[in-house]
Amino acid sequence: MRTASFAAAIVCAQFSLSAYGQSNNDFHAQVDQLADRVESRVIAWRRDIHANPELGNREFRTAKLVAEHLRSLGLEVRTGIAHTGVVALLRGGKPGPVVALRADMDALPVTEQSDVPFASKVKAMWSGQESGVMHACGHDGHVAILMGVAEILVSMKDRVPGTVKFIFQPAEEGAPAGEEGGARLMVKQGVLADPVPAAIFGLHLSSAGPIGRIGYRSGPYMSSQDNFKINVKGRQTHGARPWAGVDPIVIAAQIVLGVQTIQSRQLDVSLEPSVITIGAIHGGNRENIIPDTVEMIGTIRTFDEGMRRDIHKRMQQTAQSIAQSAGGSAEFALFEGYDTTVNHEKLTERAVASLRRSAGGANVAMIPKITASEDFSAYQKVIPGFYFHLSARPKDLPPEKIGPNHSPLFIMDEAAFKIGVKALTNLTLDYLSGN
């Protein structure tokens, strides 16, 4: 329910906005004031979500919190999209285009080790094992920031020249085994229809840089992500008589080295970077037995679709050829994941000015490509999109107390959230007004 004090705040905000002129300076100054006003609520929402994290496709509590807030603002709200997704629509008081804003809601199967008072104590089952659950990638902040942006834009509704679609997405980190989820399922279930946005914006919080720094890049920005499994088949024998069998462990070792030559010797490294990583090897159960099989799993990261397909082909050829040369065999299975996150060139050019107004020009810079992946790319396959990173590394903690994203020591300085609110709000209003 909307409280009387909150309703009064909205009325006051609308009144004060009507007193402002139509100049861009007044427009952005008012965003700054409203971001100051909503900051404490954004921090409170984030702490509540952080203390109560939920894994992909299971974000029931988070989705309820979001939906109740959006309804209290008087927005048109739909729930249950892609399992737990929430979408809300703000129709502005003036005609204009449609823009979408996205925040991801899911946490990770990580046991928190930070000592913040709102640290997660939640446990859940993931891949058949009990694990701690933690917002170790900033999604709690993403949700809270977008809730704050919605509140500000509602208070400015009469001046908003167009329509804003708020997308709160589940399962960015991946759906449970056997389930669909994330941005692809949101798109499949019509999140970009009725009305169709002309553009979509999103941000990602990080502990990698000084607080308040914004990083962006035009074109390929974050890599695609594909996983693979290689089953190497040999012939079991006594460890003292390797010539009596075929050793899949030695074959697997040669494959590990062989696939690395794909990047270093078979691809034009001046075009785009790529990564091939073997993340786990399983085989054998005793020191003096050469096993029948070895299984390897890993990941591939690329920024170019042609190079991506070429690596897939070369991975299979390399694994099979090495295994055959040693008298064994290899089966290569590919599991395609997220596409490359590609920032639209013209949209990026327009967005940079908005970011500089929000964070200060010196704090906004183009950064190198990122080999992590994001399913925000699924929206960008349909409509132009712009995605950026906002640093939230606490300045008063020693480096050993601050973990990177996905670490049990991941921690953020909440002062960055107001910058995120201003950035997304300014991006939205500048785009809709054509500034």
Image (cartoon, rainbow, N blue to C red):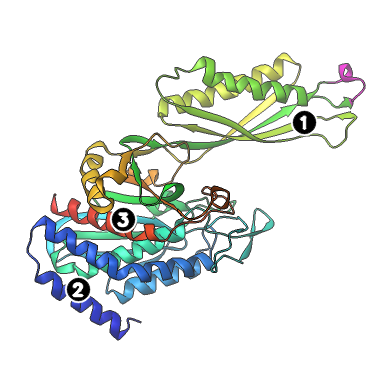
Alpha carbon of mark 2 to alpha carbon of mark 3: how far? Answer: 22 Å
Camera-side residue: 395 or 219? 395
The residue that disc 2 covers is 13
Image position, residue 401 (x, y; %):
57, 53
Residue found at x 9% / y 71%: 19
Q: Looking at the image, tell me whether mark 2 or mark 1 is earlier in sequence order.
A: 2
Camera-side residue: 38 or 166? 38
- Camera-near label (2 vs 1) is 2
Marks 2 and 3 in Cβ contact (< 8 Å): no
Going by the numbered disc 3, the residue's amino acid type is Leu
- Which stretch is magenta? 238-245
Q: Looking at the image, tell me whether mark 3 or mark 1 is earlier in sequence order.
A: 3
From this viewpoint, is residue 194 visible? no
Image position, residue 390 (x, y; %):
38, 49
Q: Quadrant of the N terminus?
A: bottom left
Depicted 189 relative to depicted 304: above or below: below
From this viewpoint, is residue 192 visible? yes
The residue that disc 3 covers is 101
